[in-house]
């Protein structure tokens, strides 16, 4: 996987995410800290360390059960996030909240992309000749609490590190050459994402269409 990223200016500020991409492109981690930015880096390190051992078939011990309903790759991501959650909770937040972290992890093996997330960003799939397909689109509290077109400051509804357990969304999908995965941090999805023919694969065009609408 090759990652392109872009930020854009608005009246509402979101924390800058910590982004990690493995040299071979097989693993992408995006973590956003609401609090101390160093805690996002800590979560990224924990996830990357576990996934490195899992990819190398190194035997690792874990207190977390593998779920038979999930593929091995999805189980690896789920376990990595659970380990990161426990580390952040016990190390930083057990007595007093300091930071919560939103995270998305993508792991590509052959033609499968496994994913796991707590909170934003949304995961969307753009396939040739098809409109954008939502894979996972978590809602934040600003959208739930906003009235009509009112735009409230972003407020995540799911973060890891705040409790001994966390709500992890997981899954996997098949990808083909030319497919694009769009990771979008925002309180709402732009309807322009579904306008036929608007996207040429250029990140600037995607960003412009989103910002023009909202």
Image: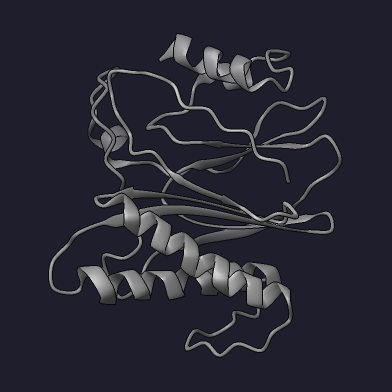
User: Which percent across, then down, holds residue 125?
Assistant: 68, 38
User: Which percent across, then down, holds residue 93?
Assistant: 21, 68
- From the viewer's side, name the closer residue of 32 and 49: 49
- From the viewer's side, name the closer residue of 100 and 21: 21
Residue 143 sits in quarter: top left
Residue shown at 56% from the left, 90% from the top: 61
Drawn side of residue 109 relative to residue 33, left or right: right
Residue shown at 83% from the left, 34% from the top: 178
Drawn side of residue 91 relative to residue 26, left or right: left
> As displayed, is residue 111 above or below residue 7?
below
Residue shown at 30% from the left, 75% from the top: 164
User: Which percent across, then down, holds residue 44?
Assistant: 48, 60
* Residue reaching furthest to the top: 212
> As displayed, is residue 137 above or below residue 48?
above
Q: Is residue 59 visible?
A: yes
> As displayed, is residue 157 above or below residue 124?
below
Residue 163 sits in quarter: bottom left
- From the viewer's side, name the closer residue of 178 and 194: 178
**In which quadrant of the rendered image does the C terminus lie?**
top left
Residue shown at 56% from the left, 65% from the top: 48
Q: Is residue 69 visible?
A: no
Drawn side of residue 81 relative to residue 54, left or right: left
Drawn side of residue 4 relative to residue 187, left or right: right
């Amino acid at each position: 996987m090759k990652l392109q990223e872009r930020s854009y200016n608005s009246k509402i500020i979101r924390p800058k995410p910590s982004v990690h991409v493995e040299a071979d492109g097989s693993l992408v981690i995006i973590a956003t800290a609401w609090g101390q930015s160093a805690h996002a880096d800590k979560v990224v390190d924990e996830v990357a360390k576990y996934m490195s051992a899992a990819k190398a078939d190194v035997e690792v011990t874990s207190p977390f059960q593998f779920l038979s309903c999930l593929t091995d790759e999805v189980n690896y991501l789920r376990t990595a996030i659970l380990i990161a959650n426990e580390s952040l909770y016990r190390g930083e937040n057990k007595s007093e909240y300091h930071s919560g972290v939103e995270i998305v992890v993508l792991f590509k093996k052959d033609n499968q992309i496994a994913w796991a997330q707590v909170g934003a960003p949304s995961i969307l799939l753009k396939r040739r000749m098809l409109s954008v397909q939502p894979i996972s689109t978590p809602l934040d509290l600003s959208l739930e609490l906003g009235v009509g077109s009112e735009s409230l400051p972003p407020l995540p509804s799911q973060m890891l590190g705040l409790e001994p357990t966390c709500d992890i969304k997981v899954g996997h999908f098949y990808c083909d050459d030319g497919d694009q995965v769009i990771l979008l941090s925002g309180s709402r999805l732009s309807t322009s994402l579904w306008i036929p023919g608007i996207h040429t694969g250029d990140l600037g065009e995607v960003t412009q269409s989103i910002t023009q609408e909202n």
